[in-house]
Amino acid sequence: MAAILVTGFQPFGRHVVNPSWQIMQTLDGTTIAGATVVARELPVEYDKIPGLLDGLWKWPGVVLCVHCGVGLEGSIRIERYAHNGTYTRLDNLQAAPQSGKCVDALGADLTLTSSVNVQKLVAELPEADQIRVSEDAGHYLCEFTYFYSLHLHIAPTIFVHVPPLDNAAGNTLESLRARVVRIIDTAMRVIADKKPGLLRPQVGVGAVVTSRAHPGCILVGRRLQDGGHYALPGGHLEIGESLEACARRETKEECGLTLGRVYPGPTLNVVGSTPSAPAYHYVVLFTQAETDGEPTALEPEKCDAWEWHPWVSLPQPRFVTLERLIESGFAPSFGTEPHAQINNVDVKL
């Protein structure tokens, strides 16, 4: 599956809390424009950056890299290019490159420009007054990191400078995160204009889990990365994996539950939007199965609780796939074999 590599920085100087990593760490494991986000924190140390980036860029399937750092007050700035030098400002270890350059073999005045059309990217965003194009990345660790990734030239890369957190100015963690998600989503679409076929619907599996200990109820959990929307256990169908195996694996990984017999359910073409994916398009293969256990939130950073709720009064807000399943007219079977009923569902596509 395609991956989006994102990074943020550790605290430094007066920034005892660095919003760049606070934002990016919440995106780890989420899906944006059909690609899985892989988030990593970077140290504010020149010597470590090249080796860390060499390793991160080996992640399979990277189609976009978004570095993020804290910048000036006010608006978000997306950097057009980065310079190889000169870097003299001291890092967290009170050190700077001896040569003053990011890549010693290259000239200090060398400038590399992002292959992403940054002007087009910003023009397609709705927050014209909150997100701007910048031509000065700061000649510090941010620009040093940006130049090194542009120098590797493995996949399209951009650098996003977010302002410090300032509730009075409207720059809350939630608002900045939402803008960064839109930037990443739009960047993927700008790239797709040059690479047709990059963005395609993904295949997911959703598990409708019931229990005789909870008559009339199904298992749902709150997806923290999507504003606490309630969703079914489930996830991506892996290469070579059966529908049943995926339902069992995801339910075990997320809830710690072992499923009984797994029955096939409806298939829905789900197009919509979520807080973490402004353009959401999945083909979702639903299943139904019983369990005799009780759930545990094994991935609390993604879902803080799994709960039994009556199918006829599921809590709000609901994740888009669960909402579409309800709208399809599907109804779970409780205490009886569901195979015949599920296969006769009239699926609305």
Image (spheres, helix red, strand yellow):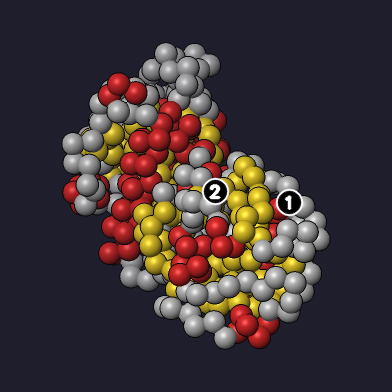
How packed mark 1 is, by other alpha carbons closer than 10 Å (few <14, some 14-19, many 20 or more), is many
Residue at point 28%, 57% (across, down): 190
Image quadrant where residue 258 sits: bottom right
Q: Secondary structure at mark 1?
A: loop
Image quadrant where residue 149 sits: top left
Asked whether residue 241 is in view, the answer is: no
| Residue at numbered disc 2 | 223
Q: Disc 1 residue type?
A: Pro
Q: In whole angstroms, how far apart are the C-alphas of marks 2 and 1?
A: 15 Å
Asked whether residue 279 is in view, the answer is: yes
Mark 2 and mark 1 lie on one chain; the one further toward the N terminus is 2
Residue at point 60%, 77% (across, down): 265
Q: Secondary structure at mark 2?
A: strand
**Front-most of residues 204 and 334:** 334
On screen, residue 303 versus residue 133, left or right, reads right
| Residue at numbered disc 1 | 295
**Front-most of residues 86 and 223:** 223
Tell me: residue 243, above or below residue 47.
below
Residue at point 72%, 74% (across, down): 262
**Front-most of residues 229 and 58:** 229
Question: Residue 52, image x and y in percent?
Answer: 55, 38
How packed mark 2 is, by other alpha carbons closer than 10 Å (few <14, some 14-19, many 20 or more), is many
Question: Residue 214, image x and y in percent?
Answer: 73, 58
Residue farthest to the right, as pictured: 292
Q: Disc 2 residue type?
A: Arg
